[in-house]
Amino acid sequence: MKIVAYCYRDPLIDAPTESENWGCEVDRVYQDLMGDRIALAQLLQDCTQAPPDYLLLRRLEDLGDRLDTIEQHLHFLETHNIEILTTAEHQSPDAADFLTLLQTLRSRAIRLGHARNRINAAPPPGRVPYGYKRGRDRYRLDRSTAPVAKDFFEQFLLYGSVRGAVRYLAQKYGKKISTTTGRRWLSNPVYRGDTAYQNGDIVPDTHVAILSRDEAAQIDRLLRRNRRLPPRSASAPRSLAGLVTCAQCQSRTTIAQVSGRHKSERYHYLYVRPVTCPQRPKCKGLHYAQVFDRAIERICIELPQAVAGLAAPQLTGIKTQITHQIAQQTAILDQLPTLEAQGILDPETAQLRRYKIQTAIAELQARLAPLPPDNIKSIAQSVSLKQFWLDLSEAERRFYLREFIQAIEIEHWPTGSWDIQLRFIFAAPP
């Protein structure tokens, strides 16, 4: 009894496997990888001379890309008394559901078309992001809407508030979007010059970017920072909102405003009070200005020390390693045209290899982006000056506080005095 097997794989849509498990001992395996089915033609030729008893297939669509081609090959094999067995469930050539097979072929053709678009770095189907228009083979800037999107990103970078940037867009340009849409804009790789696909792959530097890499990294840090804050705290008018907690009761705090008793009195006081304090008596509220002044004093003392510990050889080594890996992948990418010209790689293989290297570079860039910027020491020196904070508006103070501070804990002492402890975002190495 002679048993042969045949399989066809397209690396664009089929997952790679080291070896096929046919479930029995096979005399010979015919295998095609992309392109024309040369091994299938050889199989059919061998069947005319010495036909096997059984032919094993993974699925019927391995025999061709068209339904009529599959039917022709099945008829040829049946005339040579070759029994066909498939490893796919509910699929048999004896009672083949050709309507289902036709739908499978159409679905495979669609997925293959999308895969070819990916390796060509062509835009995926669907709605084009605001600020761009669809070109022949890539996204192109829309000169009428790209400045609006750019202004939205600059507003977010300036104040760190998605809601505030959304309101700014509606007031200045009449462009109304939801906060959820604004967050999608901020994290959309298209605005960074990259093309993202539904399978999660990202191809970098495919078109003109609205955001630079440094701006994109800053936006990612701001979004991660805002996720740690209570809802609406990112756009709160007071810079300490969402940052202060009580060390005794572990309660978050709110900023309460107390005005004068008479309408003619225009002054008001701000207090920092626990929201849900379970203790009896409850933890006392503190003057907002006193907490802010104490926090700035601690920042001026502790921030340079925290940054000095951050710039350790371990962090430098991580950055150097990732940068070196990106350089290696880029060097391989630059060699592909030469290898293709020399005939070492055929165009399809070179294209697929280029796509895989580009997605690998995108993953490395994503690992590099969350790391602290190289100029963090110089930024910390400026922020560690008390006069720097006095010259800022409340929105600007909010931005810089949340850039460095994860939480401000208030510690109450039995004597009635209190103090604060700062928890920096980068206290532990990433």
Image: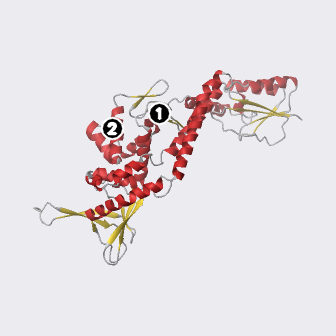
Where is residue 70? Give x, y as percent.
Answer: 71, 27
Q: Give above or below for 162 relative to 210.
A: below
Label 1, on which residue? 126
From the top left corner, tell me how far across and down residue 278 is, in percent.
37, 73
Q: Position of residue 422 (x, y in %)?
A: 39, 62
The residue under label 2 is which amino acid type?
Answer: Asp
| Snapshot quadrant of residue 34 | top right
Residue 25 horizontal side relative to residue 314, left or right: right
Q: Secondary structure at mark 1?
A: loop
* Observer-nearest of 132 and 387: 387
Of 209 and 309, nearer the camera is 309
Q: Name the residue nearer the viewer: 367 or 250.
A: 367
| For discs 2 and 1, the disc positioned in front in the rendered view | 2
Question: Which residue is located at x 27 percent, y 63 percent?
Answer: 288
Q: Is residue 326 left or right of residue 127?
A: right
In this image, 241 relative to 341: left or right? left
Q: Is residue 174 above or below residue 272?
A: above
Residue 330 appears in the figure? yes
The figure's colour scheme reads secondary structure
Reply above or below: 206 against 314.
Answer: above
Q: Is residue 106 visible?
A: no
Residue occupying the point 30% across, 76% down: 416
Q: Is there CB contact under 8 Å for labels 2 and 1?
A: no
Residue 20 picture quarter: top right
Q: Earlier in the sequence, mark 2 or mark 1?
A: 1
Q: Judging from the image, what secondary structure is the residue with disc 2 in?
A: helix
| Residue type pointed to by label 1 | Gly
Q: Which mark is residue 151?
A: 2
Quadrant into which the N terminus falls = top right
The label shown at residue 285 is: none
Q: How many marks?
A: 2
